[in-house]
């Protein structure tokens, strides 16, 4: 199932990359570059941190073909239909869910403890979107207040780990974790759910 999650993750993140590119008016090459960076950025950082070689997309070029196919399909779609900002956020939520749980599973398979697996899952889910936003000159979603972005990844990863640790089948635990991530992200988008903002008093003498 982990392989399927990663394929779905790169496909959906490629879509979100193309949609972000379209909002900035970049050319065709720019769309492909943003799609590729968005789709493989998180998994690449995870593999580097875990000293996992070869990097997943180098070991299996199928990932790149999936990214290219998703990019072309999305480009064809947006020629005839207008993609809303909400479509980008929904695609990003799905990619976050697929990649976070897949990242947790990769770290577990490498023999790491649950806290490290949870951290690797969050990095896998978040880093690609951060790179996309930086390259398209936007404040990354993970840094915007009230977005429940990294929070959703951490909660979903924890749901997966707790469910699997309690004896649930791994596939069922993975689905539960992904559902938690998507639910939190969509709730934040639709209803403005957010974490409390920390306000520190200013030093009047400064």
Image (cartoon, rainbow, N blue to C red):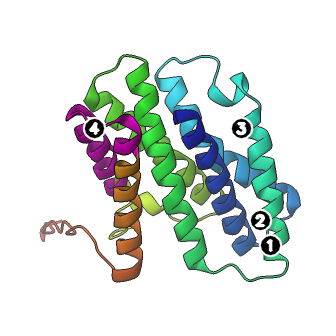
Mark identifier at residue 63: 3
Looking at the rendering, the stretch of residues picked out in magenta corresponds to 151-174
Question: Which residue is at a point 84% across and 81% down the rendered structure image?
Answer: 80
Residue under circle 2?
74
| Residue linked to disc 1 | 77
* Residue in the foreground of this view, choosing between 187 and 138: 187
- Percent position of residue 187, x then y: 35, 73
**The quarter of the displayed image where residue 20 is located:** bottom right
Label 4 to label 2: alpha-carbon separation = 36 Å
Q: Mark 3 or mark 4: which comes first in sequence?
A: 3
Q: Residue at x 72, y 47 (%)?
A: 36
Between label 3 and label 4, give the one nearer the viewer. 4
Q: Position of residue 113 (x, y in %)?
A: 28, 23
Q: Of label 2 and label 3, which has the lower sequence position?
A: 3
Looking at the image, do the residues carrying marks 2 and 3 touch, with CB atoms under 8 Å apart? Answer: no
Cβ–Cβ under 8 Å for marks 4 and 2? no
Question: Considering only order in the chain, which callout, 1 or 3, is on the residue closer to the N terminus?
Answer: 3
Badge nearest the viewer, 4 or 2: 4
Our reading of the magenta stretch's main secondary structure is: helix
Counting from the top left corner in percent of width and height, residue 147 is at 37, 68
The image's mark for residue 168 is 4
Residue 108 is marked as none
Is 46 in front, or is 202? 46
């Amino acid at each position: 199932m982990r392989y399927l999650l990663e394929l779905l993750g790169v496909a959906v993140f490629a879509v979100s990359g193309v949609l972000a590119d379209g909002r900035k008016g970049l050319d065709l090459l720019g769309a492909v570059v943003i799609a590729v960076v968005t789709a493989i950025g998180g998994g690449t950082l995870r593999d580097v941190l875990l000293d996992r070689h070869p990097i997943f997309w180098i070991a299996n070029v199928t990932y790149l073909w999936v990214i290219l196919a998703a990019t072309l399909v999305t480009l064809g779609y947006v020629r005839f239909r207008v993609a809303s900002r909400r479509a980008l956020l929904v695609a990003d939520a799905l990619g976050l869910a697929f990649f976070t749980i897949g990242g947790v599973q990769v770290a577990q398979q490498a023999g790491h403890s649950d806290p490290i697996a949870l951290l690797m899952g969050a990095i896998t889910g978040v880093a690609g979107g951060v790179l996309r936003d930086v390259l398209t000159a936007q404040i990354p979603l993970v840094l915007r207040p009230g977005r429940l972005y990294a929070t959703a990844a951490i909660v979903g990863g924890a749901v997966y780990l707790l469910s699997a640790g309690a004896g649930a089948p791994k596939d069922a635990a993975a689905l539960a974790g992904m559902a938690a991530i998507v639910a939190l992200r969509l709730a934040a988008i639709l209803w403005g759910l957010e974490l409390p903002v920390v306000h520190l008093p200013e030093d009047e003498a400064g």
